[in-house]
Image (cartoon, rainbow, N blue to C red):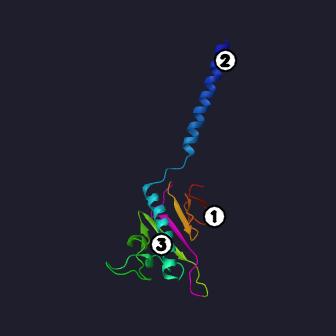
Amino acid sequence: MRFIKEFSAVMLLGLLALLGAVIFAQEKPAPPSEDEAHAVGASRTINTAEVTYAATYNKGYSINLLVLGEGLPGAQPTEMQAGLIAKGLAQGTWHNYIFTYKPGAKDKDGHINSYSLVARPAKWHKDAASFYTDQSGVIRSTRENRAPSANDKPLGG
């Protein structure tokens, strides 16, 4: 009889552990999609391009994504066509994501010292992530159907 009680207790613990594992597995967020990985990579590329642009042209950050883009083949980079990012990304679309860039206000010398960038899926779905970054270089995300902001959790956080 003692064996049956101990066996039942072990079975009950095992069943509870299995149930907990199933519940835990269902609460995990969806793994990032390939498009999400491209959106994060593009956000990093834009952050790097902005730092390069500011250092090269001494006017702060760019006025828009288009000026970070490629010029004519063989043309030298300029302040208005810096050649720092791909044409599609400069036009605001990349791997099923739409990128919205907002420069900060110009200071008294005409320099732009801040910016924000939002990347949202072209077609949102329940597992989709949207991303936010700014001059800090920190990329933040949300899986809610709204624009992400500086208040969202940093990636990996």
The quarter holding residue 94 reads bottom left
Mark 2 vs 1, N-terminal side: 2
The quarter holding residue 104 reads bottom right
Classify 10 Å Cα crowding around label 1: few (below 14), some (14-19), many (20 and above).
few
Q: Is residue 24 above or below residue 15?
A: below
Q: Which residue is mark 2?
A: 5
Span colored in magenta: 109-126
Which residue is at a point 52% across and 68% down the rendered structure image?
A: 118
Q: Which disc, if any, is residue 151?
A: 1
Instruction: Report x, y in % for residue 55.
Output: 51, 78
Amino acid type assigned to the residue bearing label 1 in the image: Asn
Q: Residue furthest top?
A: 1
Mark 3 vs 1, N-terminal side: 3
Q: Is residue 133 above or below residue 156?
A: below
Which residue is at a point 59% across and 87% down the rendered structure image?
A: 109
Q: Which residue is mark 3?
A: 49
Image position of 40 (left or right of 70): right
Q: 77 or 142, which lies in front?
A: 77
CB-based contact (under 8 Å), mark 3 and mark 1: no
Amino acid type assigned to the residue bearing label 3 in the image: Ala
- Judged from the image, the secondary structure of the residue bearing numbered disc 1 is loop
Image position of 112 (left or right of 96): right
Classify 10 Å Cα crowding around label 2: few (below 14), some (14-19), many (20 and above).
few
Could you give the CA–CA distance between mark 2 and mark 1, rounded to whole angstroms? Answer: 53 Å
